[in-house]
Image (cartoon, helix red, strand yellow):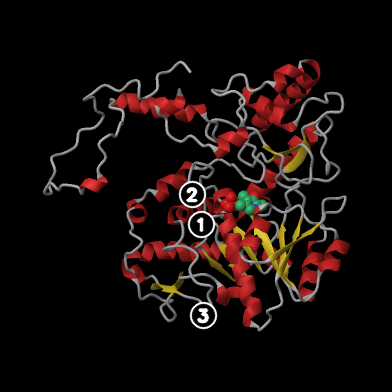
Amino acid sequence: MSEPLIYELSSPGRTGAILPEPDVPEFELPAELLRKELPLPEVSQIDVTRHFTRLSQRNMSIDTTLYPLGSCTMKYNPRINEDVARLQGFAMLHPLQDAKSAQGAMRLMCQLQMFLAEIVGFAAVSLQPAAGAHGELTGILMMRAYHRDRGDHKRTRMLIPDSAHGTNPASSAMAGLQVVEIPSDSRGNVDLDALRAHLDDSVCGLMITNPNTLGMFEEHIEEVVRLVHAAGGLVYGDGANMNALLGIAKPGEIGFDVMQYNLHKTFSTPHGGGGPGSGPVAVAERLADFLPGPIARVKPGSENGDGTNGQPLYEWHMPSKSIGRMRAFWGNFGMLVRAYTYIRVHGEEGLRAVSQNAVLNANYIQARIKHIYPVPQGERHCMHEFVAQGKFADAPGIRALDIAKRLMDYKFHPPTNYFPLIVPEALMIEPTETESKETLDSFVDALLAIAAEARNTPEIVKEAPHTAPMRRLDEVRAAKELVLCCRLDTVG
Ligand SMILES: *Cc1c(COP(=O)(O)O)cnc(C)c1O
């Protein structure tokens, strides 16, 4: 690296900020809180600005390039979301403020709950969970509580298709359930015979990701739901893939009992190093009393206005059989404001167009590459994403990882790779609806060019990336021995 590190720019006494005269008495900090040696760089404001701006440019981001990371829905985050989340009335609220002085925020939460319930066809929503996997755990705890409440203590097994997201078995195990894997059939659907064979009165329920991680809509979803219900189990829908279904299909109407949303995917709040998540849960009527709380609601009897400006009065409410709190305070409120804004800006027609275009874009890429890159379910239309394979019969040395790395030289973020586990050398591609045809075409052109390189000049692909700030990393070591601070003695 040629640029100087921020520590090398340090010069004693140089500073980037001028603090005002204190208007409170000076106070000696307890000695045990003070360190003698605290080698912070002493640098000017422009050094700091350039340092962090340069660092930010070393990473790929949705603001600089297509980010087709399957299962992650890296869509563009509209800037109006940020404007609204920064409104003083929202940004300066304190979570311990009493409800009377937070009526506007509670109204937003109430309306968001209504929108979310409507979009998926469920009876009630809690906004508490902090992200998708946290929403899964919340939903499973409600399923367990429901069975116990009915005196049914035998139900300790959770059935999970092998095409589910990895967080599904993890959340189930965390909730103390035994995970049973259900295989997929040759079309990428749940194998119905295998499902039938596992259904009995020890089944808590089925957790299903639909569309599944192969990007396929379950062709027998209604039959799957019917079978599980007939055995007394509940159906959990992993709603992280809602980007394919907005305004088109409602999991609640298909018969699901509970699902989580990933607001940070479907409803465009920044994620993946860019911000916290938010994973509200929605439930059918029979699970509504078990939702985590407190939940914002209109105070009964105040519908016609007891609050400010003729509005109803909003209050916090704990459902009667609530599994309790899943999170301190009220959820990741800033994300709720962004998701609310996104839904209001799009409206019903706009949300439907989001999913239609997300599905169209994924199918467009699939159709253009499937003759070169094997696509195991390529005879079907995909939903908002699909899984190709990064391997070629006539270029045996090349793997999915090589293709992913080489894409960085073409200035594209790599797709998800080696997931889902049921497809060898998986490249899971999700372009999202926010990309233009020109961008999709240049991404496809890059993939086709890399496929040609794999045959003609494989070493270029094997040794990629060539243009990234770092070459190929030891990824296991990078994850296990994470270096988070930039110090001369660690960077070397
Ligand atoms: C992203 C994702 C999850 C997990 O969501 P997090 O917010 O990362 O916890 C679960 N299921 C599916 C299908 C996903 O794509």
Residue displayed at 67% across by 57% down: 168
Residue displayed at 79% across by 25% down: 397
Viewer-proximal residue, 214 or 110?
214
Sequence-earlier tag: 3 or 2: 2
Q: Which mark is residue 38?
A: none
Viewer-proximal residue, 228 or 112?
228
Local SS, label 2: loop
User: Circle 1 sits on which residue?
Assistant: 130
Viewer-proximal residue, 406 or 216?
406
Name the quadrant of the C terminus. Answer: top left
Q: Which amino acid does label 3 sit on?
A: Ser
Residue 208 at x, y percent in the picture: 72, 59
* Relative horizontal placement of residue 489, taking residue 441 as reference (left or right): left
Verify CB contact (< 8 Å) between mark 1 and mark 2: yes
User: Circle 3 sits on which residue?
Assistant: 320
Residue 74 at x, y percent in the picture: 59, 42
Sequence-earlier tag: 1 or 3: 1
Local SS, label 1: loop
Q: In which quarter of the image is residue 443?
A: top right
Between the residue at mark 3 and the residue at mark 2, the CA separation in whole angstroms equals: 29 Å
Q: What residue type is labelled 1?
A: Ala
* Relative horizontal placement of residue 457, taking residue 268 as reference (left or right): right
Other residues around mark 2 within 10 Å, as few (<14) / some (14–19) / many (≥20): some
Other residues around mark 3 within 10 Å, as few (<14) / some (14–19) / many (≥20): few
Between the residue at mark 1 and the residue at mark 3, the CA separation in whole angstroms equals: 22 Å
User: Circle 2 sits on which residue?
Assistant: 276
Residue 395 position (above or below residue 426): above
Residue 2 position (above or below residue 277): above
Sequence-earlier tag: 1 or 2: 1
